[in-house]
Structure formats: C-alpha cells, structure tokens
Amino acid sequence: MENSINSKRGIFSGSVGFVLAAAGSAVGLGNIWRFPYLAAKNGGGLFLLCYIILVFTFGFALLTSEVAIGRKTRQGPLTAYSKMHPKFGFLGVLACVVPIIIIPYYCAIGGWVLKYLCVFITGHGSTAAQDKYFTGFITSQWSPIIYMLVFLALCAVVVYLGVDKGIEKSSKILMPILFLIVLGISIFALTVKKGDTTGIDGLKVYVTPDFSKVTPKGLFSTIMDAVGQLFYSISVAMGIMIAYGSYVPKESDISKSIFQIELFDTLVAMLAGMMIIPAVYVFSGVEGMNAGPGLIFVSLPKIFLEMGKVGPVIAILFFVLVSFAAITSAVSIMEAIVSSICDKFHVSRRRGTTITTVYAAVVGILICFGYNVLYFDFKLPNGTVGQLLDIFDYASNNVLMPIVAICTCILIGWVLKCNSIIDEIKIGAEKVHRQTLYVIMTKFVVPVILTLLLIEAFIRF
C-alpha cells in the first residue's frame, strides 16, 4: 500500500533530497533581505541571539509538527488536517489559503529580481543605481508583468516535473551553488573599505549586541520580529512542510533531517547578514542599514557601483544568488497548492500545476497593476501605508500564519496529544532528541507567543 501511494504522489529519494528541498524553501527572499534589515533594526547581536534560540525551540516545534503530519497522512495541507482529526478540516483550508495568497506577489517580487539580474548582466548596473529607477520600473505597466510571468514559468516547470525529477533535482543543483555564492560574497564583504571604515567594522555592528534595546518594550519588539522572520525562514504555517513531509520515505530519520534544516537555514540567514550589512555599513553607514525592503533594489545597486570594477561582478553573483533563492522558495509555495489540489480533487500533477499557474499569473498581473492602474494607499493595522502587494503580505504573514500555527498547536498539543507526532518521528529514527522540549513548546510556549504576535498585528487598528 505504501509503495502504491509513493508511486502515485512521488517521493524524495532520501533524506538528502528532502533536506535540500526544505532548505531551498526556507532560504528565500526573506532570508536575503529581511533578515539583515531586522538584525540591523533590532540591535545586531541581540536579534541574532533571540533568533537562534527561537529557531531551535519555537521553530523546531512547528517544523517537527508539520513534517510529521505530512509523512503520517501522506497528504497535502488541504486534506492532511482532516486526516489527523475530522473536526480540523477547516485548518487545512486556512493552511492552503496562505500559499494561495503568497504565490502571486512572491512571483511579482521574483520578477523584480530577474529584472535586476538582467540589468547587471547586460552592463547597465549604473542605470539601476540611479535614484527612482526602482520606482520607475515597478510603476511601469508591462515590464514587471513580463518578468513576473517569466519567473512564474520557471517555477511551474520545476513543479510540473514532479518531486524527484523537478523539486529534488533542482534543489540538489541550486542549493550547493547558492551556498557557495553566499559564502564567497560574505568573505568578500569583509574586505571592502572606504576611508578608514572596513567591512570588519560593519561585521562588529552586525554581531555585537546593542543592549540599549534591552528594555521591556524593545526586547518584546525584537522577539516578535524574530518570530515573524521565523515563519518565512523555516516555511512553517503555510502548508509547505506538510506537503514536503508527505514525500519523505518512512525509513528516513526526520528528527535528524529537521535538525539539519534548522542548522542550514540559520547558517545561511547569518551569512546573508554578513554578506550585506558590512558592505552597506562601509558605503552608507548605519542609516543605510535601515533601508528595509528597498535594501536589495535601491541601496545595494548604489553600493555595487561604488565598488569599482569588481562591483558588476559581485552584483551579478548576488542577483544570481537571490534568483536561485527566490525560485526554490516559490517552487515550494506552489507545490503546497498543487499537492493540495491533486490530493483533494484527485487530478493529475499536470492539471494541478496548470490550474495553479493560471491563477498565479492572473492575480500576479493584478499585483503588478497595484503600482500603476490599480494604485491606491491603504493604511495597515501596523501603521504603515501599503498597496495591493502589502495587503496580501500582511494578511498572510501577520494574520493567517499565526492563526494556522496556533490551531496546529491546539490540535497536536491538546486534542491529539503530542505522542501522535512523537510516535511518527520515532519511525526510522536512531534516536529522538528534544522530546520534552517539543511537548512544552507545542502545548504552552508557542501558542502564547503567537497569540501575542496576533494581538500585535491588530493593536493599532
């Protein structure tokens, strides 16, 4: 029976394929630009310390639950929860809605990355460094749509090829290259110099804790930002790890794999900060590190221009890296939807991929239009003013994902009890570590922290 299910749904060839695919999902745009920005905003080393602790406690609990649910049920997120408990089918719907909301705007941003890669490859990097270039690009009517559709097509091809020939094979190729580029640029960033300021000075700012942030309000803000970053960093509460878990062989040691995913994600996130913050600090000072989402598309092109002859080369490598990271993450988001469609409606992967691609293209075009023909300002609950893309992002990241994670903890910790997951983890495992930690985090700590995060999302309404 197990072999029949595996041949129909696809399966990873082993733990390496799963770990690289899961790491590819985790190492996305959030790790490349969001992590360095949040680290700079929240006291450097203080944020890093909070994040590392949360990854191996908070993140560990959510990641373990989702991978185990996937392998136990052999279902995508839409139907997996109802298999776990009939009354929690609604949670499967919510978990599937999250990637449905994310995929169109993620592809739009992925298109922006491809645009900048093309600009630097064709030798027009100085143009990209000009003021208002980015604004001019995203507000133009057709160019963002074309790049978004190209990016979407690349992701759709990988998903269409299936688990082993598409997702696993591409991850085994892209992830080692991605890691080497991150490592190489990180080392180079430490060597940059302007006047008396060096990359090492920027590294000190990055890793040294700013204890002025250690106030009740400041520490709470840092922890909440680290928790919010975790959702994107380890791809939980969006159905991805349930989908990928459903393709993991029963004989695989998922406890060991989860630790490897935690380790790989944390290492790349740390290197992403080391890759960006020292260079930004050298050429733009502390103020440059507060650029937020505009860091990649506004601040870095100017910095690459200041690097001289080596700048265009570093820029190309950087945008190749970001493109790879964006594609592996977008593939995982799309796979969460496709697996749900295939399992719920018993259609082929070809049809599921086609439906998802058409939807992402149509809504992605609307997202692109949100900066021109459909432009409007909308005040979000956190006090910022955003457009259509920002509304989608806020709804998924700040509202739905915490709700999905809280309800998952209630289901596992209080309704089914944690042993339902621990017993699944023990299958194929040499030894299961952190069992007591898993129970405490799932039943008590994670729901409380996420409830606070959810309250914070609406507190300024």
Image (tube, rainbow, N blue to C red):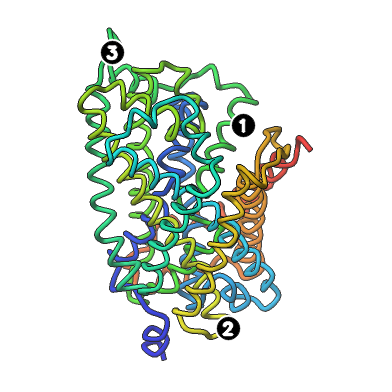
The image quadrant where one finds the C terminus is: top right
Q: What element carries label 3?
A: strand
Q: What residue type is labelled 3?
A: Lys
Q: Which of marks 2 and 1 is in front?
A: 2
Which residue in the protein does label 2 denote? 345
As shown in the figure, which amino acid type bears the numbered disc 2?
Phe
Is the residue under label 1 in contact with that under label 2 (CB below 8 Å)? Answer: no
Pointer 3: what residue? Answer: 194
CA gap, disc 3 to disc 2? 59 Å
Instruction: Tell me the distance, in whole angstroms, between the alpha carbons under discs 3 and 1.
Output: 36 Å
Label 2 secondary element: helix
Q: In this view, does 429 lie above or below 39?
A: below
Query: Which residue shows up at 28% across the image and 67% down it?
Result: 169
Cα gap from disc 2 to disc 1, whole angstroms: 44 Å
Residue 449 appearing in the image: no
- What is the x, y in percent for residue 368? 57, 49
Task: Name the spot of residue 420 as percent of width and height, x first.
Answer: 54, 71
Does residue 46 appear in this view? yes
Residue 319 on image: x %, y %: 33, 42
In front of the other: label 3 or label 1? 3
Q: Image quadrant of residue 386?
A: top right
Q: How crowded is mark 1: few (under 14 residues within 10 Å), some or many (20 or more)?
A: some
**N-terminal-most mark, 3 or 2:** 3
First of labels 2, 1 by sequence position:
1
- The three-letter code of the residue at mark 1 reads Phe
Image-based side of 373 in relation to 164, left or right:
right
Q: Name the residue under label 1.
A: 220
